[in-house]
Image (cartoon, rainbow, N blue to C red):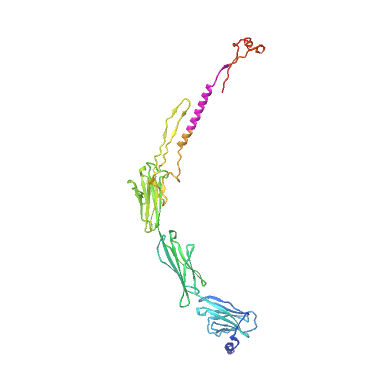
Amino acid sequence: MANAGCGSLATILFSFVFQAALLKGAAQYPVVSQNLVTDNVSVVEGEMAIISCRVKDSDDSVIQLLNPNRQTIYFRDMRPLKDARFQLVNFSENELRVSLSNVSLSDEGRYVCQLYTDPPQEAYADITVLIPPGNPIIEARDEVLSEGNETEMTCTAMSSKPAATIRWMKGDKELPGKPRVELTYDKMYTVTSRLTFTVNKEDDGVPVICIVDHPAVKDFQAQKYLEVQYKPEVKIVVEFPQGLTREGENLELTCQAKGKPQPQLVSWVKVDDDVPSHAVITGGDLYIENLNKSYNGTYRCVASNSVGESFDDYILYVYDALTTTPIPTTATTTTTTTTITTTISYPEVNQDTAPSTEPAAHDSRAGEGAPRTVDHAVIGGVVAVVVFAMLCLLIVLGRYFARHKGTYFTHEAKGADDAADADTAIINAEGGHTNSDEKKEYYI
């Protein structure tokens, strides 16, 4: 034990003597050696750093490790420095590897690997201490937002080294922020990013996320959900009738309104006129019995909340009641034809019931965009007229053929070939006209 203690003491004394010699002589001009190899180290505060001094071509020269103040940490496998955080990991003729636990900011700097040759050779290992920022703090100027308004948020990452980087996300979309970096008295960095944007109703419930990027931490973020109020969305639904609105029928409309906050006031009005006196209004429902054309016009449902007011329009046009009028049958000797006619009423353009431009109104008129109904009685009437015309044509042709039938006689004189002239042939004919054949021919 005494010998071991003497050996350690001798090693330490040798190290001090060697350091003194370096200060006086060649060590004043150390050589940066390519034979010595080391690596720079980045370590998070509180964690462990590994410093390695490696020799490519060993010649049994002594290796030692110095701190940034050029104090000997290890001389060969001996530790003269009284700091138990330094521990020997490996020592051989080719490598000196030392660990430093519980690293603090004061440990940052340039460490020296030194090889005892003539002149001495040196290599350097820079230790960088990373200090993560504190939990990011996100703040909003407005807790409750209104649709269409601009708002502002800030996110702060405090006391980090190096300075952190802040990104913003709204839902799945990245937004640009305006960062500001401050260096504090303890050589730390505080970063503040400011975000300004305009909200709409689709942003309600969407998270705004502040993401902090730093070498010492991953997935460091804070978020805040948006609460956006918006004016009502109004829609009129026709409950009855499903087709055209005709005289004598009933009309039932329902007004659907939603918003944030939920609209408490929903009302019905008739544009440029009064709602019919016998109309029944129950909340968002409008009911009118026994329609007639005096009820034509634009009916508007209005809903409002603390943000604003919205409306939807329904244009009512009352058609004539659907009727079919038969024509008495007409009997003739040739054919019997029954003709059915149907009266179709088309709406006249009423300037007082023109649709509003915003929002788009529901329209009960069968105009552009509305399907036209086809009455089958019209088709039947057309077919009857065609059949009647064909029958008339057949009758006219039959009577024409009957009137052009005739009878005529032909006189062929027998022995006319032997007569000298025509008179002789007639005189010599047998039987004269009495034996002539009566022939009938018909011309078509």
| Quarter placement of the C terminus | top right
| Quarter placement of the N terminus | bottom right
Whether residue 152 is in magenta: the answer is no
Can you give x and y, in whole percent of width and height, for residue 63 in the image? 60, 83
Q: Which of 76 and 296 is in front in this view?
A: 296
User: How many numbered marks does the figure carry?
Assistant: 0
Q: Is residue 47 left or right of residue 54?
A: left
Residue 151 drawn above or below residue 159: above
Quadrant position of residue 68: bottom right
| Camera sees residue 129 | yes
At horizontal 53% and vertical 23% (from top left) the residue drawn is: 401
Quadrant position of residue 29: bottom right
Can you give x and y, in whole percent of width and height, for residue 174 in the image? 49, 64
Quadrant position of residue 116: bottom right
Q: Is residue 310 left or right of residue 415?
A: left
Whether residue 402 is in magenta: the answer is yes
At horizontal 49% and vertical 30% (from top left) the residue drawn is: 389
The residue lying furthest to the right in this view is 418
Q: Which segment is the magenta one?
A: 384-408
The residue lying furthest to the left in this view is 277
Classified by dominant secondary structure, the portion drawn in magenta counts as helix
Can you give x and y, in whole percent of width and height, for residue 377 in the image? 45, 36
Can you give x and y, in whole percent of width and height, for residue 10 in the image? 59, 89
Residue 343 drawn above or below residue 305: above
Q: Nearer the viewer, residue 248 or 339?
A: 339
| Camera sees residue 134 | no
